[in-house]
Image (tube, rainbow, N blue to C red):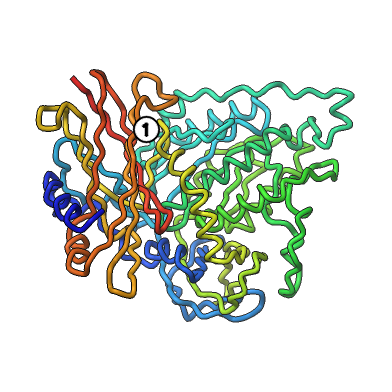
């Protein structure tokens, strides 16, 4: 986009109130939020969320950065930032009323922690899934939610039942409408006895379902990565057949980390056989760690399973290595979910830049210590030392698919790139077309400065229109604008917003628009929805 075009666009987009834009899309000034952009630069900032509890399991407050020491593979590291998050910090975002026909993807809440409940209808017996659904409904019928909660179902693909909200009634209503998809019955046969999968109760799953689970966990991690801060994943399932973190890279003593052994990744089965999903599992684990996701497995089978130990052990490992807690041997699933949400609501966030700049892709152990007596710490065990440049290239290759997935009907809002969009009704002024004007918060964009002082951006603004068929859009419009901004124009944009627009020639009818902005410099994006009627 040339300079003159950008200046015209800034004037043409005056339908939006600049004050309203600033109030609703200004990024949160916290270390957690700012780290999201830093992760996409050529340095690697490591973020570690820490739950500190006393010997009674109660959260410990009042700790300072000086109370912690951080080691990576046994070597001390310098803490670069420190913050404390607690339940009282969640509050509705302070926003001004939007003008007519204007939508935004700005979060409705300022919250240090988000909770995601994943209802697993892929792994486990249908009877356990039905019981788990009843327990979830019971939980939402009386729950008081201090933090935003989103509800997903794990099917052949990830399904959003309710986006983030503190309205427990809305979550309960969404769950009551949901009917778990019945899986094909897994019955024991002569062939199954020869299979690596025991169908009698340890896992109640199949090779196909495990592959689905790994893929969709990776998708969920990428979705949650667009939100700042800690995410607590309450995974409600009868079966946890995969271990995301192999023992080969987690030695029992010392910090002499062994080279990655691909065969150590995969699915641990009660027949002691291993189905190797090495690459897929490692990718999912890395995505969850990068997205600051702590996993809280809740065993949907409850009490009464005498052959359920292997799955429970895997759940324990999955929780402990991500900084969460596993809940099993209890029929009070609602109580377990409450405990998981409460546990992840109070935590400290530490960040550091690794002294070791050899990006060899290997797993690096993180260890936190405190001299405070009687304080127990829970946090993720480490990260993969992926070259930041290689990581950026991999994200660039993946981002188009992720962005397209987010534009699908029923997908959740994405908030990494924040914007407002004005949907102008069809009129003679718009030449009979539906016009969508974007006003993108420039503070969420990554501008790259060249030697001549110019600021460069590469932004894609896209609209997908869905009619009666919600499976595929009937029309899509999108293009990428490249801005080379002189200092004075860059300063003007930073005071206002980055503009772009799309035009759609739609027939008369009612439509749902999925509206998105992709920053191709940072590989981050934002998405929201709007309903419109064309006369």
Measured along the vertical axis of the image, is residue 433 above or below residue 202?
A: above
Q: Nearer the viewer, residue 447 or 107?
A: 447
Residue placed at 25% from the left, 18% from the top?
509
Tell me where residue 500 appears, x and y as whole percent.
24, 47
Tell me where residue 517 appears, x and y as whole percent.
34, 46
Report whether 105 appears left or right of 278. Answer: left
Q: Nearer the viewer, residue 484 or 164?
A: 484
Residue placed at 64% from the left, 40% from the top?
299
- Crowdedness near tag 1: few (<14), some (14–19) or many (≥20) residues, C-alpha within 10 Å: some
Give the residue pinned by disc 1: 170
Measured along the vertical axis of the image, is residue 392 above or below residue 534?
A: below
The quadrant of the image that shows the C terminus is top left
Tell me where residue 391 appears, x and y as whole percent.
54, 60
Tell me where residue 281 appears, x and y as whole percent.
66, 49
Q: Secondary structure at mark 1?
A: helix
**Residue 47 showing in the rendered view:** yes
Residue placed at 42% from the left, 31% from the top?
172
Q: Nearer the viewer, residue 281 or 232?
A: 281
Report whether 171 appears left or right of 380. Answer: left
**Residue 55 showing in the rendered view:** no
Report whether 30 appears left or right of 272. Answer: left
Residue placed at 26% from the left, 51% from the top?
440
């Amino acid at each position: 986009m040339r300079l003159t075009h950008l200046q015209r666009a800034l004037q043409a987009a005056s339908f939006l109130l600049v004050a309203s834009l600033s109030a609703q899309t200004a990024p949160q000034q916290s270390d957690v939020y700012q780290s999201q952009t830093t992760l996409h630069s050529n340095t690697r900032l490591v973020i570690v969320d820490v739950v500190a509890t006393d010997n009674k399991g109660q959260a410990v407050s009042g700790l300072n950065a000086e109370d912690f020491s951080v080691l990576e593979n046994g070597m001390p590291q310098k803490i670069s930032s420190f913050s404390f998050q607690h339940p009282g910090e969640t509050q509705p975002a302070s926003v001004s009323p939007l003008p007519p026909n204007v939508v935004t993807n700005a979060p409705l809440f300022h919250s240090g922690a988000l909770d995601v409940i994943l209802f697993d209808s892929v792994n486990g017996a249908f009877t356990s899934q039905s019981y788990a659904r009843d327990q979830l409904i019971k939980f939402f019928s009386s729950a008081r939610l201090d933090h935003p909660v989103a509800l997903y179902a794990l099917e052949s693909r990830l399904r959003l039942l309710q986006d983030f909200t503190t309205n427990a009634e809305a979550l309960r209503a969404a769950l009551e409408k949901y009917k778990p998809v019945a899986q094909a019955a897994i019955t024991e046969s002569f062939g199954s006895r020869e299979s690596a999968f025991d169908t009698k109760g340890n896992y109640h799953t199949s090779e196909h379902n495990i592959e689905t689970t790994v893929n969709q966990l990776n998708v969920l991690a990428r979705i949650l990565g667009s939100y700042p801060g800690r995410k607590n994943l309450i995974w409600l399932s009868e079966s946890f057949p995969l271990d995301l973190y192999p023992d080969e890279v987690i030695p029992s003593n010392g910090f002499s980390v062994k080279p990655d052994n691909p065969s150590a990744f995969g699915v641990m089965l009660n027949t002691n056989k291993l189905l190797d999903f090495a690459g897929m599992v490692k990718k999912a684990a890395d995505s969850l760690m990068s997205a600051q996701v702590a996993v809280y497995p809740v065993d949907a089978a409850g009490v009464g399973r005498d052959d359920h130990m292997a799955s429970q052990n895997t759940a324990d490992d999955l929780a402990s290595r991500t900084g969460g807690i596993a809940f099993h041997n209890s029929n009070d699933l609602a109580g377990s979910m409450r405990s998981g949400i409460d546990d992840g609501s109070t935590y400290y966030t530490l960040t550091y830049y690794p002294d070791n700049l050899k990006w060899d892709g290997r797993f690096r152990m993180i260890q936190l210590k405190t001299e405070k007596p009687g304080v127990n710490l829970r946090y993720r065990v480490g990260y993969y030392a992926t070259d930041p440049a290689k990581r950026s290239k991999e994200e660039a290759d993946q981002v188009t698919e992720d962005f397209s997935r987010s534009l699908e009907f029923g997908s959740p809002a994405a908030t990494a790139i924040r914007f407002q969009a004005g949907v102008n009704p069809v009129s003679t002024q718009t030449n009979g077309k539906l016009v969508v004007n974007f006003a993108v918060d420039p503070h969420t964009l990554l501008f790259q400065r060249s030697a001549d002082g110019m600021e460069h951006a590469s932004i894609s603004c896209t609209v997908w229109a869905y009619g009666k068929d919600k499976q595929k859009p009937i029309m899509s419009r999108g293009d990428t604008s490249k801005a080379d901004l002189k200092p004075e124009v860059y300063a003007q944009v930073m005071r206002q917003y980055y503009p772009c627009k799309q035009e759609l020639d739609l027939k008369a009818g009612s439509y749902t628009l999925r509206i998105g902005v992709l920053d191709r410099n940072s590989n981050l994006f934002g998405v929201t929805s709007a309903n419109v009627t064309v006369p």
